[in-house]
Amino acid sequence: MSRYTLLLVSILCFQQTVAQVKEEKAPATLKSVLLAQYKSTWDQQEWFVPVEKGIEGITAQQASWRPADSSHSVGELAYHLLFWNKRLLDQFNGKKEADFNGNNNQTFDAFTEASWTSITQQLKQVMADWEKAIEGADEAKLRSWYGNIANMNTHNAYHTGQILYIRKQAGNWDAAKGVK
């Protein structure tokens, strides 16, 4: 997948959030903006398919399929999202982060077919915890974290675009779910 395609997905994610604010009554708080963006990238399909729907209905074997161009598999991308969303959530909640040597390639490597169900369940839990964390945070904390949370949301949308592209290449994406 070209970098230009991935950049376009990221730009569209940002534009969708801006368009939503313009079309609807503008959210009154930073919290409501961050929650709207979070939900549109995780579990509420609006202008594009969110992560949750992108990983839905795929078997472990399908999740391990890798395109001929040596791109990551859906499973590796899901693990990568789990790794970074959990790490950032731990930081947000003031918890000690797991050890990490800074090699981003390792954030894709822990996927196996046997771990697929666990990865998707953990990702769903981390994302549910993120929603609660944003909802429960005061305005001052959100002001200091809004850049990280917004970047997390964009990161999730970016990799969802990759997941859908790979699923389409593999022939296991249902176009009725949002991307033809």
Image (cartoon, helix red, strand yellow):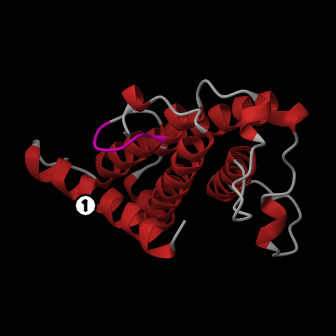
| Viewport quadrant of the C terminus | top left
Say if 103 sits above or below 145 in the image: below
Question: Residue 166's spot in the image, x, y percent?
Answer: 59, 49
Residue at the disc numbered 1: 15
Specify whether 174 is left or right of 166: left
Residue at the spot 63% in from the left edge and 41% down from the top edge: 170
> Taking 56 as reference, is 119 above or below it?
below
Q: Is residue 3 above or below residue 87?
A: below
**Is residue 37 toward the left or the right of residue 57 in the image?**
left
Rendered residue at 43%/50% (across/down): 138
Q: Position of residue 117 (x, y in %)?
A: 78, 27
Dominant SS in magenta = loop
Say which of 166 and 55 sits in front. 166
* Residue type at tag 1: Gln
**Quarter of image, res 62:** top right
- Residue bounds of the magenta highlight: 46-50
Q: Secondary structure at mark 1?
A: helix
Look at 79% across and 32% down and name the residue there. Answer: 61
Q: Position of residue 130 (x, y in %)?
A: 56, 42
Give yes or no for residue 4 being in the magenta stretch.
no
How far across and down, in percent of the image, does residue 66 sit?
A: 74, 51
Q: Residue at x 37, y 67 (%)?
A: 8
47 in magenta: yes
